[in-house]
Image (cartoon, grey):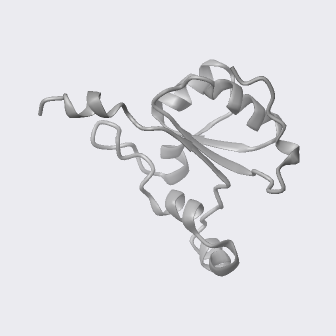
Amino acid sequence: MIQSLDLNKNPIQIKRALLSVYDKKNIVELAKALNKNNTEILSTGGTAKKLRQDNINVVDVSDYTGFPEIMDGPIKTIKPLIEGGIIGLRDKHEAEAAEKSIKWIDLVICNLYPFSDVISVED
């Protein structure tokens, strides 16, 4: 359980965060701390649903990008608006990001599906 999360000590203001997790343990506590600090939260399907159940303000990635999750869910965030916001170099790509309406994503929280479960699924 997260006891304390003091984001004010972080020299980088987290304006926007992407939360997309398989294991949702403690994700609500983290999201509440982010909301308390006025961080916009982008999230994918199941994670967004979990956060909404706990009254967390969240923007679905599919609404943010204008493109739905595809191929039964694993293709969610591979879009220029997401990837550009994560890996763009702010000092170098600011003009191009603005031109393409790409907003910086300051924090990414993700974890992966359990590998053994994924490889045991038959086609």
Q: Residue at x 66, y 19 (%)?
A: 54
Residue 32 coordinates in the image, percent (x, y): 74, 29
Question: Residue 120 in the image: x percent, y percent?
Answer: 19, 28
User: Looking at this rendering, what residue extends furthest in the left direction?
Assistant: 123
Taking the spot 27% from the left edge, 42% from the top edge, the residue there is: 71
Identify the residue shown where x is 36% and y is 31%. 114
Front residue of 111/123: it is 111
Tell me: residue 41, above or below residue 114: below
Q: Quadrant of residue 27?
A: top right
Q: Residue at x 27, y 30 (%)?
A: 116
Going by the image, does 28 lie left or right of 100? right
Nearer to the camera, 107 or 35: 107
In the rendered view, tell whether residue 46 sits above or below residue 62.
Answer: above
What quarter of the picture does the N terminus occupy? top right
Coordinates of residue 50 in the picture (x, y in percent)? 56, 23
Q: How many badges with numbers are in the image? A: 0
